[in-house]
Amino acid sequence: MDVKFEVVQLKIPEGSNIVVGQTHFIKTIEDLYEVMTTSSPGAKFGIAFNEASGPCLIRHDGNDEALEKQAIENAKKIGAGHVFVMLMKEIYPISVLNSVKLTQEICTIYAATANPLQAIVAVTEQGRGIVGVVDGFSPKGVEGEKDIEDRKSLLRDVIGYKR
């Protein structure tokens, strides 16, 4: 059996974050919609899920049409069964990630990021599957004292962590 690998560049709209994961059941869309709406009433999001059996449709929902359309396009480009793509604005993945992970159907989270993101997809005669992701860029060095100060300032002064 032959395996071919593809690199799929995912599009993340300006000011958005993406969560990509593996799931296993058609009700994923409804459950992830519920996670998003109960986590932050002001969050904007779009979700797409590639069904892996039956009609094999891209199921989708959301409260922001542009994010929902882009989630569908990303899911289509990945083309792997039981993969979901969530795009969100006005909320960070850290605010919903534990709830997403605790959703009964969720098997794996591949990435939660605002960085450029590539999915590494294996292609066989049966179909496609994500084997990993490339999230952002490679390290350029080790942080120094000024970098540590900047990191702590970002977390405390900008994001509001540990005030």
Image (cartoon, helix red, strand yellow):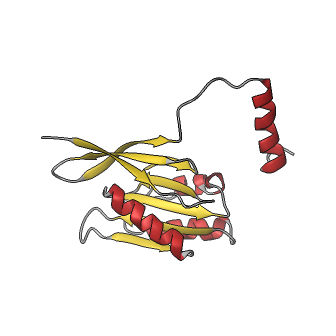
Q: Is residue 17 above or below residue 58?
A: above
Residue nearest the viewer, comparing 40 with 124: 124
Placement of the N terminus among the 4 image quadrants: top left
Quadrant of the rendered image containing residue 132: top left
Q: Position of residue 147 (x, y in %)?
A: 75, 30
Q: Residue at x 51, y 54 (%)?
A: 19
Residue 94 vs residue 159: left or right?
left
Q: Is residue 28 visible?
A: no
Q: Residue most toward the left? A: 1
Q: Residue most toward the right? A: 163
Total numbered circles: 0
Q: Position of residue 144 (x, y in %)?
A: 74, 23
Q: Position of residue 35 (x, y in %)?
A: 58, 65
Residue 20 vs residue 35: left or right?
left
Q: Residue at x 40, y 56 (%)?
A: 23
Placement of the C terminus among the 4 image quadrants: top right
Quadrant of the rendered image containing residue 27: bottom left
Q: Position of residue 121 (x, y in %)?
A: 32, 46
Q: Residue at x 37, y 68 (%)?
A: 26
